[in-house]
Image: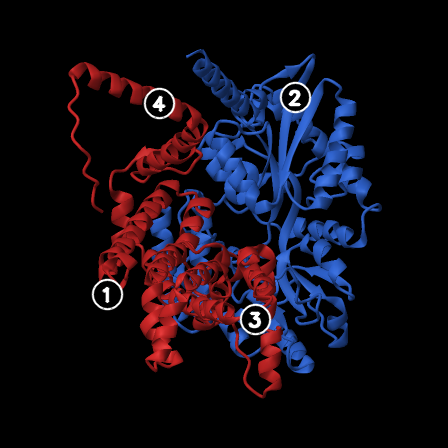
């Protein structure tokens, strides 16, 4: 970003003061107008965050006052909690598999809708529905039924002469159905991809086809590079969402079998609300914040290598 | 300038109004009397059926005690505890709290529930018709911290039609070997998709009962583990043996059926299951066959039947309330009032007052009557009650169930499982 150089104006101290006063007056009014939101933000977001940071250094079961224990929650987390390690493993496995799949799938659908002419608006809406209802109890129940012992999927496998799978008894199978459920909620990234695709100038493709580039080549040489800012955005959002996945795992598998789908947020909930270790859960929450921050930072740092903005001069 | 103060005034007054509307704000506090009425809050968890019965009983209580008004608060079981701990954290517990035995110790040690001894002695809460076995679990170091709202016992539930079909007889005193033999018959006879015995994910309780037969407990009075490793190894080996030979349901089937709220004995997928005796009331409507209640088997080398009577749930009174008298009247009403209990219909478990029991026996459904009769049987066999589980019980139970899963799936031998569990549990219990 380059700042526009304005012609320098020299002000007397008197005038400077007046300007400053005026701007303070203006901003006061602005702050006054947004004060309801500010109250909420400090009272319901910043306040509880600071409190949870304090709690992460205490032992607190909600029934008695917090007891200061220093770093012991964090020490226990990293040295003496195999379930925490298991939760990290499960969460990473899930993010590494589900996020790329979801992005690829939503991009694929966006391409189809982008090519479609009539009525694609209606289909876009229909395809968006799973994302709206996907996190609900009803869908979790449907999933349990579908993949149950006598569910539709196993009946199908059975009729094809294949052996049935115990989806809720086998760790890998349980992970797969959660990945499937989350990938099925592709609506949000799909819509964003669609918007991105519509931004790409048509004449680029025309020029490319004149030069004899085929569909595939056009996709890799034009579509993908032009979409990289959108991919970047979706990747960040989906990764953050992936690390925080809770509802699906909590409702469908309950973290089982044998902790195979004990996602970070599920374990955190268990520690907080089933075992009432609020201090320990607060420490976990802050560690999760650091983990997500770290990965977001890495993606941001590497973005200069693969994300192309128009302002790059069409590199 | 004037305008700006106008805005400021509007904003502040708005926020004051909004703050005033929130629950727990100035308007929602407790500790108020309306006119000459004392207002008490009563909270419980349960099903819609329970909510309807309880609100009806509350109306009768208010009729009989015009100076007291009851504000009910009720939810499902899981959200109930989240809500209650939040209320406890804000020193805003309801006057009367429906309490679960597994949580009671935590509430006692946090000084949140009242010792009711003085209220019992002066007759505000009348326990004259209550046998000691019904209340034993709610007593800690001489203090009475809850009144049982209904009793049950850990038992086996069985499908009577299947028992008849295979001509099975398991009279009280039968052994685990007898059980194996009988269940094997059903499993062989019914073929695919059916088994004999279902552990219903209740191994934690089943093992508690098993250990009691050797005069051991899951927890000691002081909150440490109260059983020997060998006892748990034997139990796990016995269960694993039943599963591996198809006598008992495979673990994933058990988990799935139970998570979906069905019952295998109602579906004829199993002939017998462990469960609380009042489970028969919930399972009977789901089953075309009559469901019976029986005691658990006797283990080899057992020294006692292992049975005990326990509260399904209890009433506690908040220690910080200034309306304990009114709260105690309510608890007394729920315990002893004949008309009130005609409405409540023993839905919370077998009434602890013998007068109420006798009165209700010929009014209740057949399945409820079965629980009355069963508790008479257990009452004669019952040993001393199980000590209250210590705080951290939820975590220990979770650890137990994880180890159990690992053993069932063959990731660990029973010995390894017990070692792992003991070290985890001891770390949790400190």
Q: Which residue is mark 3?
A: A147
Mark closest to the chain's N terminus, 4 or 1: 4
The tint chain B carries is: blue
Please provide percent x and percent y for residue B275.
Answer: 62, 58
| Image marks 3 and 2: residues in contact by CB distance under 8 Å | no
Q: CA distance from mark 4 to mark 1?
A: 43 Å
Q: Is residue B310 above or below residue A306?
A: above
Host chain of mark 1: A
Marks 1 & 3, CB-CB < 8 Å contact: no
- Specify the quadrant of the image occupied by residue A193: bottom left
- Label disc, if present, on residue A315 of the rendered structure: 1
Q: Residue at x 81, y 47 (%)?
A: B364
Q: Position of residue A173 (x, y in %)?
A: 47, 72
User: Which chain does the numbered disc 2 sit on?
Assistant: B
Q: Would residue A307 be found to the left or right of residue A157 on screen?
A: left
Q: Secondary structure at mark 4?
A: helix
Q: Give me the disc on residue A231.
A: none
How many numbered markers are drawn? 4
**Nearer the camera: disc 1 or disc 2:** 1
Question: Which residue is denoted by mark 4 in the rendering?
Answer: A26
**Real-space Cα separation, disc 3 to disc 2, in angstroms:** 50 Å
Tell me the crowding category of disc 1: few under 14, some 14 to 19, or many 20 or more residues within 10 angstroms, Cα based.
Answer: few
| Viewer can see residue B289 | yes
Gap between marks 1 and 2 measured at Cα? 75 Å
Q: CA distance from mark 3 to mark 4?
A: 60 Å
Q: Identify the colour of chain A in the image.
A: red
The C terminus of chain A sits in image quarter = bottom left
Q: Which residue is mark 2?
A: B39
Q: Residues within 10 Å of mark 3 (few under 14, many from 20)?
A: many
């Amino acid at each position: 970003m380059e700042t526009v150089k304005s012609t320098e104006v020299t002000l007397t101290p008197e005038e400077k003061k007046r300007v400053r006063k005026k701007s303070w007056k203006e901003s006061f009014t602005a702050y006054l107008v947004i004060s309801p939101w500010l109250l909420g933000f400090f009272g319901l977001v910043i306040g509880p965050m600071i409190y949870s940071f304090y709690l992460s250094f205490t032992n607190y079961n909600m029934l008695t006052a917090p007891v200061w224990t220093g770093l012991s929650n964090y020490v226990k987390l990293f040295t003496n909690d195999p379930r925490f390690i298991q939760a990290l493993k499960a969460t990473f496995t899930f993010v590494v598999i589900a996020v790329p799949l979801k992005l690829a799938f939503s991009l694929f659908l966006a391409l189809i809708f982008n090519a479609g002419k009539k009525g694609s608006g209606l289909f876009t809406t229909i395809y968006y529905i799973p994302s709206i209802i996907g996190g609900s109890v009803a869908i979790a129940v449907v999933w349990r039924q579908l993949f149950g012992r006598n569910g539709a999927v196993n009946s199908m496998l059975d009729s094809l002469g294949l052996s049935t799978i115990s989806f809720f008894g086998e760790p890998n199978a349980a992970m797969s159905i959660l990945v499937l459920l989350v990938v099925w909620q592709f609506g949000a990234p799909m819509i964003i991809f669609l918007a991105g695709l519509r931004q790409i100038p048509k004449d680029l493709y025309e020029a490319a086809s004149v030069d004899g580039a085929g569909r595939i080549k056009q996709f890799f040489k034009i579509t993908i590079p032009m979409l990289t800012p959108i991919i970047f955005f979706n990747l960040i959002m989906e990764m953050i969402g992936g690390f925080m996945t809770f509802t699906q795992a909590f409702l469908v598998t309950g973290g089982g079998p044998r902790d195979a789908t004990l996602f970070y947020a599920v374990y955190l909930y268990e520690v907080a609300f089933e075992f009432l270790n609020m201090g320990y859960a607060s420490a976990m929450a802050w560690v999760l914040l650091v983990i997500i921050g770290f990965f977001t930072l890495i993606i941001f740092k590497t973005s200069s290598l693969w994300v192309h903005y128009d302002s790059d001069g069409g590199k | 300038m004037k305008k700006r103060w106008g805005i400021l005034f509007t904003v502040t007054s708005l926020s004051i109004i909004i703050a005033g509307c929130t629950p727990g704000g100035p308007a929602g506090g407790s500790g108020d009397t309306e006119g000459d009425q004392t207002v008490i809050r009563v909270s419980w968890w349960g099903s819609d059926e329970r909510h309807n019965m309880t609100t009806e009983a509350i109306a009768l209580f208010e009729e009989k005690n015009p100076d007291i008004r009851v504000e009910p608060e009720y939810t499902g079981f899981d959200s109930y505890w989240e809500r209650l701990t939040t209320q406890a954290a804000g020193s805003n517990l309801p006057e009367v709290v429906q309490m679960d035995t597994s949580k009671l110790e935590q509430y006692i040690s946090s000084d949140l529930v009242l010792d009711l001894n003085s209220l019992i002695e002066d007759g505000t809460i009348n326990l004259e018709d209550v046998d000691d076995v019904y209340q034993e679990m709610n007593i800690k170091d001489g203090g009475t911290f809850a009144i049982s709202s209904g009793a049950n016992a850990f038992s086996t539930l069985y499908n009577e039609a299947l028992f008849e079909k295979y001509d099975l007889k398991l009279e009280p005193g039968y052994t685990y070997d007898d059980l194996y033999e009988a269940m094997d018959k059903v499993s062989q006879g019914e073929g695919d998709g059916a088994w004999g015995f279902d552990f219903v994910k209740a191994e934690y309780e089943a093992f508690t009962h098993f250990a009691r037969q050797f005069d051991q407990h899951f927890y000691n009075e002081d909150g440490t583990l109260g059983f020997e490793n060998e006892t748990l190894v034997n139990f796990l080996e016995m269960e694993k043996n039943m599963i591996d030979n198809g006598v008992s349901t495979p673990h994933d089937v058990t988990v799935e059926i139970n998570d979906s709220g069905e019952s295998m004995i109602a579906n004829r997928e199993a002939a017998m299951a462990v469960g609380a005796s009042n489970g028969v009331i919930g399972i009977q409507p789901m089953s075309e066959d009559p469901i019976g209640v029986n005691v658990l088997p006797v283990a080899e080398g057992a020294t006692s039947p292992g049975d005990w009577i326990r509260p399904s749930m209890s009433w506690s009174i908040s220690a910080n309330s200034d309306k304990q008298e009114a709260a105690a009247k309510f608890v007394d009403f729920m315990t002893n009032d004949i008309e009130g209990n005609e409405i409540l219909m023993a839905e919370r478990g077998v009434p602890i007052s013998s007068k109420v029991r006798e009165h209700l026996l010929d009014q209740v459904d057949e399945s409820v009557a079965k629980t009355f009769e069963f508790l008479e049987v257990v009452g004669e066999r019952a040993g001393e009650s199980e000590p209250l589980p210590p705080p951290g019980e939820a975590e220990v139970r979770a650890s137990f169930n994880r180890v159990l899963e690992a053993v069932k799936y063959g990731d660990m031998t029973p010995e390894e499982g017990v070692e792992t569990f003991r070290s985890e549990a001891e770390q949790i219990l400190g």
